[in-house]
Image (cartoon, helix red, strand yellow):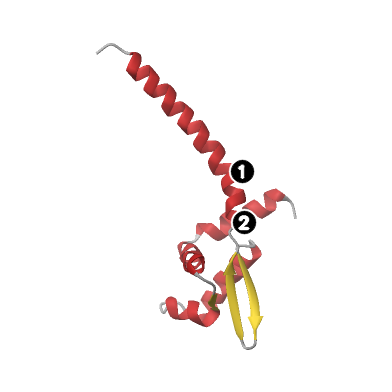
Amino acid sequence: MSSESNDDLIFKALAHRRRREILDLLKQEPRTTGALCEAFPEMDRCTVMQHLKVLEDADLVIARKEGRERWNHLNSLPIKNIHDRWISAYAGHALSILDRLKSDLEGQPE
């Protein structure tokens, strides 16, 4: 799969508030699917599993079976790649514009 396709899957996964909330929980520690379902009582198990599937497809969650339990682990590398590819480049550009604006404003007489 191309890098562009991977980026699309990651952005799609991050676009939904519930999936970001799941990632926030997994950032603290790996959790079983059952524990994730308990953390979101307003969603049924099927809905939680659908969100986990989208996160897995984007490689943001790695699931491991241990006995009867399914442990979900955060894989933050795709988020770092998005940051490196998109966010840091645009943040640097924005900072240079702000720096130029600051210089222009400081150079103006009052």
Provide the secondary structure element on which disc 2 rests: helix
Which residue was labeled with disc 1?
Answer: 85
Nearer to us in this view, 73 or 86? 73
Residue 110 circle label = none
Extreme residue in the top direction: 109
Q: Identify which residue is drawn at 42% across, 28% down.
A: 98
The C terminus lies in quadrant: top left
Which callout, 1 or 2, points to the residue nearer the camera?
2
Q: Residue at x 65, y 65 (%)?
A: 57
| Quadrant assignment for the N terminus | bottom right
Which image quarter: residue 86?
A: top right
Q: Position of residue 54 (x, y in %)?
A: 60, 66
Asked whether residue 44 is in view, the answer is no
Amino acid residing under circle 1? Arg
**First reached walking from the N terminus: tag 1 or tag 2:** 2
Q: What is the residue that sits farthest to the bottom in this orientation?
A: 68
Q: Which residue is mark 2?
A: 77
Give above or below for 79 relative to 57.
Answer: above
On the image, the x and y values in percent for residue 69 come to 60, 85
Residue sitting farthest toward the front:
29
Q: Residue furthest right?
A: 1
Q: Quadrant of residue 56?
A: bottom right
